[in-house]
Amino acid sequence: MESAGSLGTITPSRGEQLGNLLTDILRDGGFSLALLGDLEGFPVAWATAPGEVAEARAAAVALMQRSAAQARAQLGLGTTDEIMLHDDRGRRLVCRPFRAGDNELILIVLVPGSQQPYRMMTNRALREVRRILGSAGE
């Protein structure tokens, strides 16, 4: 488990809890990737199906997050709850930016099917990350 620069050091206990949570989310949701990162693209914890590369996706998502922030500012939109990319094979890369205490984080899941539900599982993950990091979040 790695800790992100903006979060400081995550205790081994919390790091293990976050890793276990993402492993559960990956399995229970049927996802190919479950990653928790900071908004700079540094992975905090992740779980991947065979063949997935978490770190490369986190960096790309950080770029997407910054682009969304610029669009929000220019269009006067409120807080972004979800950013999603679809590919031509029906996969969806779902990014859920959120706050846990003083930490700005992003949960990323790769949903392999276009009709596969994901929202309930990502909501569960957000609640649990906030609990593990000791905050109610926003």
Image (spheres, grey):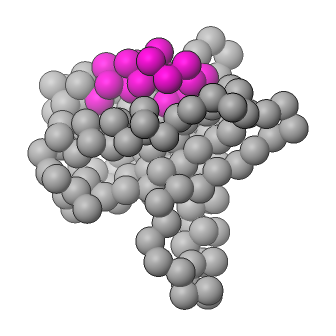
* Quadrant of res 39: bottom left
Q: Residue lying farthest right? A: 88
| Residue 18 location (% of width, % of height) | 29, 29
Q: Nearer the viewer, residue 60 or 92?
A: 92
- The quarter of the picture where the N terminus appears is top left
- Image position of 62 with respect to 53: above or below: below
Q: Quadrant of the C terminus?
A: bottom left
Residue 69 is one of the magenta-drawn residues: no
* Residue 99 in the image, given as x and y percentages of width and height: 31, 58
Measured from the top left, where is residue 90 in percent x and y?
79, 33
The residues colored magenta run: 18-34
Which one is in front, 81 or 14? 81
Residue shown at 60% from the left, 68% from the top: 68
Q: Residue at x 63, y 59 (%)?
A: 64
Residue found at the very far left of the displayed protein:
134
- Magenta stretch secondary structure, dominant: helix
Q: What residue is at 60 percent from the left and 23 percent from the top? A: 32
With respect to residue 76, does 79 lie above or below? above
Residue reaching furthest to the top? 50
* Residue 54 placement (x, y as % from top left): 57, 31
Q: Residue at x 47, y 15 (%)?
A: 27
Q: Per the image, is 22 magenta? A: yes
Q: Is residue 44 visible?
A: no
| Residue 30 as seen in the image, left or right of residue 88 | left
> Total marks drawn?
0
The quarter of the displayed image where residue 2 is located:
top left
